[in-house]
Image: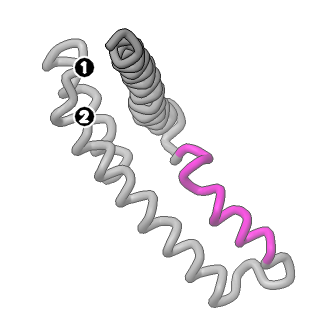
Amino acid sequence: MLKLSLIFLAFIALFVLLLRVAVIFMGKISGKYVGEKHKAAETIINTGTPPITWICNSVKKMAELREDPTGARAVKIEGKARNACLRKLQGLTKYFKTSPLCQDEETRKILLDKLSKVRG
């Protein structure tokens, strides 16, 4: 009986430890997600351009087109990059419309106005 109790106690301790690790891991993931959203909004508002993480694939593809940077393929890549950036900007706007992490409603309104001007 003592052996069974010790096994049960070890199981509970392991379960609690794994649950704690999972909570810490989820906190880091959600913090990274929220941080990326806020950094992207800050970059867009301050510079008027999309963050480099949004356009890095297009930049790589354009670098491969050294011989014909104005050809049909380059135009297609630029169009896809623009559409992807606009989709991400729309998602960012949607995020800030419902995010509880804005200081107050006035701040939210200013932020959304600036993001819509960039999209404009």
Asked if residue 24 is positioned above or below residue 82 in the image, the reply reads above
* Quarter location, residue 103: top left
- Can residue 27 be seen here? The reply is no
Q: Let me know if residue 117 is in the magenta part.
A: no
Return the residue at label 1. 102
Q: Which residues are magenta?
A: 51-64
x and y percentages locating residue 106 in the rendered image: 16, 18
Which quadrant of the rendered structure holds the N terminus? top left
Colour convention: one colour
Residue 120: horizontal and vertical position, in percent?
31, 53
Verify CB contact (< 8 Å) between mark 1 and mark 2. Answer: yes
Q: Amino acid at mark 1?
A: Cys
Q: Secondary structure at mark 1?
A: loop
Query: In the picture provided, is 95 more to the left or to the right than 66?
Result: left
Location of residue 53 in the rendering, given as x and y in whole percent from the top left corner: 59, 48
Q: Residue at x 39, y 30 (%)?
A: 30
| Element type at mark 2 | helix
Residue nearer the viewer, 92 or 72: 92
The residue lying at 29 percent from left, 52 percent from top is 90
Give the total of numbered labels.
2
Magenta segment's dominant SS is: helix
Mark 2 lies on residue: 96
Q: CA distance from mark 1 to mark 2?
A: 8 Å
Q: Quadrant of residue 94?
A: top left
**Residue shown at the point (51%, 34%) measured from the top left:** 43
Residue farthest top in this picture:
2
Q: Nearer the viewer, residue 99 or 58?
A: 99
Residue 110 shows which numbered tag?
A: none
84 over 17 or under it: above or below: below
Residue at image position (70%, 81%) is: 70
Q: What's under tag 2, amino acid-wise?
A: Phe
